[in-house]
Structures are given as structure tokens and as C-alpha cells.
Amino acid sequence: MSIQISGTNVIDNSQNIVNGGTGSFSGTVSVATPTASGHIARKDYVDGLIGGGGIGAWVKWNGQGTISISDTYNVNSVSDNGTGLYAINFSTSFSDGDYAMAGICGNINNSTAGTNTIVSLRQSFPPQAGTCYVVTGYNNVGGVDYPWATTYVYR
């Protein structure tokens, strides 16, 4: 099989060959779920295998007042379960709760700024395939709402 493509912008961000380029194909070209050596895989297929560059899920949110998510990968919502208590709900569940979690949170212009702010797993709620229960706080004080928190889940 050979593929020859020339011109500018012949493959767009959706991995489509656009009319502005020229090219010729001989043999069978597969751009789908690869089933054999030599098949071409779409970007969304590869991203699904590696999960955002090795991270299974991540989210950045504002935990004060009404929860608002500013950016996310594989997280469809963050639920407020009390002061500093949250449930991170995954868009696509993991096969089980055997994953690692890390997180940080912050408070600007507050007496707790600069202290050891953390996001940690809630002890009484083990990780589940579809939800990760966390608490935000600082030093030995848990249950604090912060204007931003970030959590990463590794599988």
C-alpha cells in the first residue's frame, strides 16, 4: 500500500483530506478502529486508549457557592456534598475503583493562602468506578470550600 499526498492543508483537524491538496491511494486504506498492522488510527481512537496523555480523568472547579467547572477531561460533573466535600463523576467510568488520585486547591487573599492545601480521597468513601469522593482542606483542617481545586485521576 502506498499513500502520496501533496499540497497545503491537505489533512484538516478532523483528519479529512480536503480538496486543496492532491494525492493518490493504492491498496486498502483503513481509517477506523485498527484491526491489523499497518492500519491508520483516527486521533479520537488513540486518545481513547491513552486517556488524555496517561491521565484517566482530571477536573478544575470552583468549590465556593454553586460549583462551576472551568476545565475537564472525562468528568461530567462535580457534586457538592457539604463544606469541602465533593463527588467527582466521570463521563466514562473506569472498570473499577483501583486508580490513584492527586489534587491541589487554593485560596487567594485569605489567611490560609500558602498553607498546605490538598485534595484527598474521603476515607469513608472508597473510590468507585464512576465516582471519586474527595475532601479539600489545609494542614490538618478538612472541609474547606476553595475558589479553585484541581484533581487528577491516574489509571
Image: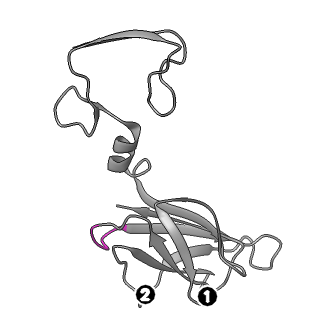
Residue labelled with disc 2: 123
What residue is at 69 percent from the left and 74 percent from the top? 115
Dividing the picture into quadrants, the one containing residue 64 is: bottom right
2 or 1: tag closer to the N-terminus: 2
Amino acid carrying label 1: it is: Gly
Task: Give, as a three-letter code, the residue at label 2.
Answer: Gln
Instruction: Inspect the magenta stretch and tell me whether residue 54 lies in it.
Output: no
Residue lying at the far left of the rendered structure: 36
Seen in the picture, residue 33 relative to 78 is either above or below; the reply is above
Span shown in magenta:
95-99
Task: Please indicate whether residue 115 sits to the left or right of residue 45 in the image.
Answer: right
Image coordinates for residue 37, horizontal then vertical, percent:
17, 29
Against 22, residue 65 (above or below) is below
Q: Is residue 126 above or below residue 39?
A: below
Helix, strand or loop for disc 1: loop
User: In what quadrant of the picture does the N terminus appear?
Assistant: top left
The residue closer to the viewer here, 4 or 126, is 4
Q: Quadrant of the C terminus?
A: bottom left
Residue lying at 48% horizontally and 67% vertically, measured from the top left:
102
Report the residue marked by disc 1.
Answer: 143
- Left or right of residue 87, residue 111 in this image: right
Name the residue at 38% across, 67% down. 100
**Where residue 91 appears, x then y in whole percent?**
44, 65
